[in-house]
Amino acid sequence: MKPVLFNNTVLRDGHQSMAATRMSTQQMLPAAPILDDMGFSGLETWGGATIDACLRFLSENPFDRLRTLKKAAPKTPQIMLLRGQNIVQYTSFPDDVVEAFVRCMCQNGMDVIRIFDALNDVRNLRTSVQAVKKCGKHARGELCYTTSPVHTVESFVKLGVELEKMGADSLGIKDMSGILQPQIAYKFVKELKRHTGIPLTLHTHDTAGLGAASYLAAIDAGVDCVEVSIAPFANGTSQPDTQRMLALLYEHPRCPEFDTKKLAELRTYFEGVYKELSKFTSPANERVDSDILIYQVPGGMLSNFRTQLKEQGMSERLDEVVREIPVVREALGWIPLVTPTSQIVGTQAMMNVKFGRWKMICQPAQDIALGRYGATPGPINPGILAQIEKQSGKKATQERPADLLEPGMEKYRQQCVAKGLPDSDEIVVLFAMFPQQIEALLKPKAAAPAAAPVVSKPAATASPQPANGQGARTLYVTLGGQRHEVFVETLAS
Amino acid sequence: MKPVLFNNTVLRDGHQSMAATRMSTQQMLPAAPILDDMGFSGLETWGGATIDACLRFLSENPFDRLRTLKKAAPKTPQIMLLRGQNIVQYTSFPDDVVEAFVRCMCQNGMDVIRIFDALNDVRNLRTSVQAVKKCGKHARGELCYTTSPVHTVESFVKLGVELEKMGADSLGIKDMSGILQPQIAYKFVKELKRHTGIPLTLHTHDTAGLGAASYLAAIDAGVDCVEVSIAPFANGTSQPDTQRMLALLYEHPRCPEFDTKKLAELRTYFEGVYKELSKFTSPANERVDSDILIYQVPGGMLSNFRTQLKEQGMSERLDEVVREIPVVREALGWIPLVTPTSQIVGTQAMMNVKFGRWKMICQPAQDIALGRYGATPGPINPGILAQIEKQSGKKATQERPADLLEPGMEKYRQQCVAKGLPDSDEIVVLFAMFPQQIEALLKPKAAAPAAAPVVSKPAATASPQPANGQGARTLYVTLGGQRHEVFVETLAS
């Protein structure tokens, strides 16, 4: 029996799950060479929400981060998380933009691309998988784990087989909510290994206190790799801590070898970073919360949720909103909860509670019902679909979402040129997803010509506008080079 | 395969581990009948630090609590934790006091007595085991789990066999530090079940994030019962949450059945209590802390340590002190770290660092070396023993500690009478352990005749006196019925 491999996530999912994705490249650099020397089979360093956070909160060019980290940790394969056709955004992009993005990151040193689709619609993974393979890099096809009347181990295994056929170099089980129980993990891994011939990684979160035990079960069942982080960016809503996993595997025939002194050093280092990021950390992320077993809310979503509800003056209604989530999921064909569906379902659940069930339906929820994100695992509630079709005047589609889109690169390139921005692929793909942010990054004065300190409005997100909050707004104020999120409310007059 | 049994600890270890033992009987009562109906095989409600906390902080007669809880939850066996010959204190008591204490609690409804000795010296359990059996109640002999060169699964199994021969009705593995790894738990349970014929319970803490996974391994190995709590008095430094354990056992052939709606109700109720006790709770108790795995120090001990070192102006020397612990343990025969030995070893480690190794030896550490707590698992360091014998003028003994003590009940009874206190066995056994507290409880004015609010000095503990802190003291101030711990420092003049 081979030792299980460990990928380390502290530089991506670790801080995304524990500190709102706010770790800066500078904060990563002292740890990168140590991490590189440890013997991890991969370091997750990029993708997910980090691109957005680089641009929105940290005034960093994400490709600079990639190049810098690649230089600082050249030996260990670097891993990133790609949302398939959504790249690292919330909606579908044309194939040529996806291909250009993949090319840019592969050219800059990315090695392993974890590719998922929130609906598990394999058509949304094909372009990315092919683009990665064209660059000679490793495409890991992810299965977004969820439970529902339409999801079974068998249905997931079928999906895994399809991804292998599509050309995925390995498979990942992505348990973003941390709801995978040990017995199911065991069966899931056994069955996938029986029906596929490529390596398998399990990625989970310890949110509900199941993660580490499910890793053990998966290791018993023959999983090749599990993903771990470094405390305090570990456990709770993040991945289990490396040191902890080693203790759990003590005397296990598949226990890998790691230098525990170096792990302790890393922990000490990251404790300092955790303190620096104290504005973005929360004891609620650190503790195990079995509520999640009832509500199926991913870790990151739950912490965002608390913030959003607070901003909406709805903090006391968390329970109600969270209880509405399965109602929304069922109506929308039992979609898994992962970016962007988690945000969409969360927003709709909030709106159902605030305005009455289905009184208002947010645009992205309408788009899901209309097939604009792809095929949902189960059928859309016919009554709600009819309501949406009537209100929007649009018809539901069965087509692959990207097939409805025109090629985008040249259009975005022209827009970059028109705005006086560089027209390299790297800038153009970022501009395609984050036009305001990339402009603010490259031409800070243009974004707010009259003001110093720099004040920029946040980009529109899937979060609903407060109904009676015209006087309330979030500002990002950069003062002495530090970006601050400021929520301003005025009293109703 | 029989479903695994769950004992619930929320009314004892749950709040002892998460909220400094501060849950009052009034806070327990609304939950007690619900807990009683759930199908737990036992409810831990008493013993450990609860007796001390009732008297010292809650102005409750602990026997009143016992009677009240027995009435509120009459169906489920109630469980308590007894420190063997130390009863619920830090030093040995004469046999007749131990016997009287056991009689009093058994007569008042206690059903299952968990009996342990910090040194695992079986002679310190015999009187308690026999007294419990004489009362027709259930004696559970506990094995205090620790790691050291002299502790092996085999040595623990030998101990279990001895306890069975002594008459224990069942055995418990008491993993107070939460350091028992799954593979060891599996082997430990397998071997104990092979060599003994009585039921076996595993008790652990999730402090290092190993607890729940070790429960699973123990369940696979055939353990009869594991102990769980109710969130938020669960996980972290406490026992794993019931709901979480059920999720972990989902589809496991030994998964028991519990009403999850009622569990959610209990959780909601205890969330309210947790908020009421917010002065005594801490995020540090809630999170998984792999520090323990680095230092091999129990969680509670580490947090006490941080406080003590701060008081000593030695905060920066935590690492040094913690590294000294194995040195002290080895010199003192590799004693496990559990009340009271954890306090004693911690204090001595601090003194070794502060004054130089073995320059000063605290009284309880001397007593351990001299055999006054019983036989240590390994030999005492001969050089240090010689030093202690010389300095103290005392000789080490091989005798059972309680054999050196005169019977105590009549002496304590006379003291009660002299102080105008009732002379019932119940009051006398409490007086034997907590003379000041029981007097303060029964005659609050007598304890502080001149003062209202009531001010009482804390009982002496094993913690060292601050060398230069003559002006510093902890006061307990009762104001409007609420007891407050106040630490007062005066500046050096």
Image (tube, coloured by chain):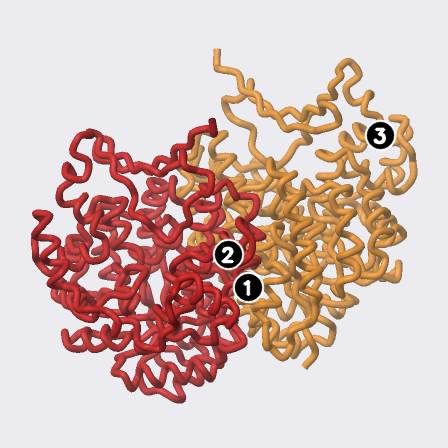
Chain colours: A red, B orange
Secondary structure under tag 3 reads: helix
| Chain identity of mark 3 | B
Q: Residues within 10 Å of mark 3 (few under 14, many from 20)?
A: some
Q: Contact (CB < 8 A) between labels 3 and 1?
A: no
Quarter of the image where one finds residue B282? top right
Residue depth check, mark 3 versus mark 2: number of the one nearer the observer: 2
Q: Residues within 10 Å of mark 1 (few under 14, many from 20)?
A: some
Q: Amino acid at mark 2?
A: Ala
Residue depth check, mark 3 versus mark 1: number of the one nearer the observer: 1
Which percent across, then down, holds residue B223? 65, 72
- Counting residues from the start of the chain, the first of labels 1 and 2 encountered is 1
Name the residue rendered at 40%, 62% in the picture.
A392
Name the residue rendered at 75%, 57% in the picture.
B35
The foreground one among A392 and A463 is: A392
Residue at the disc numbered 1: A327
Residue at the disc numbered 3: B442
Secondary structure under tag 2 reads: helix
Secondary structure under tag 1 reads: helix
Q: Contact (CB < 8 A) between labels 3 and 2?
A: no
Residue that extends furthest to the bottom in the rendered view of this protein: A195
Disc marking residue A253: none
Q: Residues within 10 Å of mark 2 (few under 14, many from 20)?
A: many
Viewed as shown, does residue A204 lie left or right of A83?
A: right
